[in-house]
Structures are given as C-alpha cells and as structure tokens.
Image: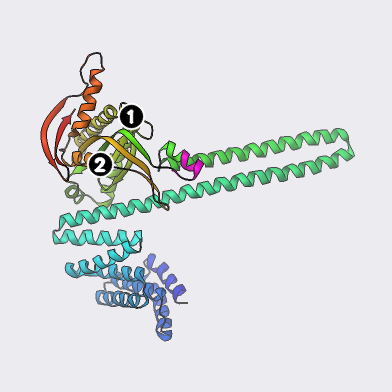
Amino acid sequence: MVATLDNIGVLYFKNRLWDSAMIFYTKALDIFERNNYRNHNSTYLFCNIGDLMEQVDRTDKAIEYYQRAVQMSGEIGDKLGKARGLNGLANVYLNKGETAQAEDCAKQAIVLAINTNTVNLTLKSAGLLKQIYTKQGKFKDALEMYQLEIASRDSIAGKENQKAVIQHQFKYEYDVKEAIAKAEQEKKDGIAKAELRRQKVQKMALLGGFSVMVLFAGVFFRQRNKIGREKKRSDELLLNILPEEVAEELKEKGSAEARLFEDVSVLFTDFKNFTGISEKLTAKQLVNELHECFSGFDNIIAKYNIEKIKSVGDSYMAVSGLPTANPNHAEEMVKAAIEIREFMLNRKKTNPETFDARIGIHSGHVVAGIVGVKKFAYDIWGDTVNTAARMEQNSEAGKINISETTYEILNRSSISLRSGTSPFTFEYRGEIEAKNKGKLKMYFVS
C-alpha cells in the first residue's frame, strides 16, 4: 500500500498537480508511521515528499524529509536511497547558496552512486557537483564533473542502443519461428482442403493443390521480406557500435578476440576553451553544437575508411589502419585531419561562437578489442594512444600536430612518388616537453 500510494503521488507530481500528489503521499506516510514500516519504499517516499516540498518552496520541510530519507536508508543499508536523499539535500543547499554543505552532500552521493554502478544517480550527482564547483570558482573540478556527466549520459545512450539491438535480434528470431510455423500450418490446411477436393473431383483437387502452393509461396515470401527488413535494422544498429569485421565475428562466434595491429595512426581532437564557451550556451545549444561538429567529423573519416573509436565530452578519437590493414594509414589520417580542420574553420566563419579544434596524430602499434559484457565497446590501448593524446594536448587551435614517427612515415611515402615531393608541408617545432613522455619532436602539418 505504501508503494502503491507513493506511485500514485508520483504520477500527480509529474503532472505538476502538487495538492493531489500530497494527498497520496500523506496517506502513504500515515501507513508508514502507524506500522513503523522500514524498507526502501519508505526511503523513496521521504525523497518524493522532499521533492514536492522543494517545488512549493517549503525549503525547511524539504530538508527535513531528505534528512529522514538519509537516516532511514543508513539504518536499513539502502545505498541508492541514501544517494538520492543526499542529492536532494545538495540541490536544496545549492539553491540556498550554501555551497559547502551542498558539496559535502553531493560528494557522499556520487561515491555511493559509483560504488553501486548506478549511472542515473552518477549523472545527477556529477551535474550537481559541476554547478557547485562552478559557483565556488573551482573550474578544473567543475570540468572533471562535466566530463563525468557526459560519460554517464553516453553510457545511458549506449545501453539504450544495445537494448535496441537485442530487441531487434529477438524480434528477428521470433519472426523466423512465426513465419515457419505459419507457413507449415497454412500448408497443412491447404493439403487438407486439397484432399477433400480430390475425393470429390480429381481435376478440382489438382487445381486446389496448385492454389495451396501459390498461397504458401505468397505467405513465405511476405514473411521472408519482413524478416529481412528486421535483420537489416539489427545489423545497422550493431555496426553503429562495432567495426564490420568485429561485428561479424561476434555474431558468428559469440565473442571477438583482441588483436595487435602493428601499423596504425591514431587521431585525437578537442576544443580550445570548451568550458568557457559552453558556459555561454544553453544545455540544448551545447549538445546541438557538439552533435553538428562530431557528425561532420564522422562523415569525413568515413571517406578515408577510418574507424571512429569514441567521443568523450569534447574529445574525439579515431584510428586509421584497423580492423583492415592499410599501408597508407598515416597519409589518409592526415588528409582527414586537414578536412576536419577546414570544416571547423568554415563553421567559424558562419558561427563565431563555435569551437576552435586542436588536432594531434601519432603512428605505431595498438591492441584493439571489445571490453565489457553488459555494455560492450570497441576500444584500443597502448603507448601509441597515449602519445597521440600528448600530440593533441601540445597542439594549437586550428593546427595539426604530428609526432616524429608520423612525420618520417609521410616522408618515406613521398619518396615513392614520381615527383619525389610530399603533398604536405611541415613546420618543425623542436623538442617539446610532453606529460609523462619527456621531450618529443613535434611538427605542424598542412
């Protein structure tokens, strides 16, 4: 009864009918207090009442119920309820301008959310800490929380994508069985009718048998076309997550082995002063701008058969030369990088508020494979990845910074050209200190 009344209150709350919501919350609270009810439903009830009190500007009451939720969840060991109550307190304190208390509550909440692997709560806690740190002027900490917020949102989106793949795969298998069963049943029905007609008139039986075959063929082909469409949708969703060769191996074997790729080029991009620009945009404008930029990047790398690995926050990562080996991996990666740079410069002409991109490239060997079980992802590892990240970090806005290794590969490839000249121009930057790598030779390329 407590859970049911609480859920009815939530429905009214979501429709902004505060008085009606409070009536059902109060009924649930009365049962709780008369029976000394103690489990997670009680914790959720306190949090819901706290949410309602906050909406109607009864701040003291909101704090009281959030604190009761935290206390109750602590007594019964309900970590999720405690995290939710702490997030509620953090939000109230933040709105009151008491950032120290808000920070303390949100920090406790995010630890519980991460320890319980609850992505939605992690997203909420990270968002609150981002706002708190911003008000406190702790912009580095705020950026870290923003990156965690984006990663949590990507995780939720990835789970939805994976769920869609599984649903389509299940529907495909179900439709196959349904089509076979339906065709067999209609075939049996047709044979029975044909037998009856044969007993009456042999000529009519022959005609009836032919009709049954036509009917069976029609049903079969309609079902086969339907199954084909569903399978195509499932395959397209899977290819949004994995390279084609890896997806085929996963479908065939149920798993995909990690592989070493000796010769690849890794690209990283990020946006200069991303935090400063993002503060001038609404959440919707920020997401739309990132979507437009990364969609443009996706279209460019597709021209050169480059594999996108992932995007995290304002960072974009891709690799040339896998899963299919490509002897021209460095040249094609640099060509793609030049197009990405030009794409961003052209956007800047029409939209001065957009970002300035920094790009870094390094070549070498990597290990690639699938990580995770419930939310699998194709990723790459190795020193080549770390060095490519350092190239990007030491680049400049509107510039492409490459390593000495990539520079030498491009020079070797130019020797094989009849003209003996490279299609690229290079600007040697000298040896530059890179984090955890020491001094590295770097070049701007155009």
Determine the secondary structure under disc 2: helix
| x and y, in percent, of residue 281 in the image | 22, 49
Residue 304 numbered tag: 1
Mark 1 crowd level (few <14, some 14–19, many ≥20, 10 Å Cα): some
Residue identifier under label 2: 383
Judging depth in this view, the residue of 83 and 3 nearest the camera is 83
Magenta region's main secondary structure? helix
Q: Is residue 166 left or right of residue 54?
A: right
Which residue is rendered at x = 72% and y = 46% of the image? 185
Which residue is rendered at x = 28% and y = 31% of the image? 333
Q: Amino acid at mark 2?
A: Asp
The mark that comes first in sequence, 1 or 2, is 1
**Which residue, as the protein is rendered here, is positioned at the far bottom?**
34
- Within the image, what quadrant is residue 15 found in? bottom left
Q: Amino acid at mark 1?
A: Tyr
| Residue 377 belongs to the span the image colors magenta | no
Which residue is rendered at x = 43% and y = 49% of the image? 162
Q: Please say if 276 is above or below 26.
A: above
Q: Give the residues drawn in magenta, as a range.
A: 248-256
| x and y, in percent, of residue 109 in the image | 28, 66
> Mark 1 or mark 2: which is in front?
2
| Residue 252 belongs to the span the image colors magenta | yes
Judging depth in this view, the residue of 17 and 237 nearest the camera is 237
Q: Is residue 199 visible?
A: yes
Q: Please say if 198 is above or below 105.
A: above
**Which residue, as the protein is rendered here, is positioned at the far left?**
430
Mark 2 crowd level (few <14, some 14–19, many ≥20, 10 Å Cα): some
- Within the image, what quadrant is residue 51 found in? bottom left
**Which residue, as the protein is rendered here, is positioned at the far right?**
200
| x and y, in percent, of residue 433 in the image | 12, 41
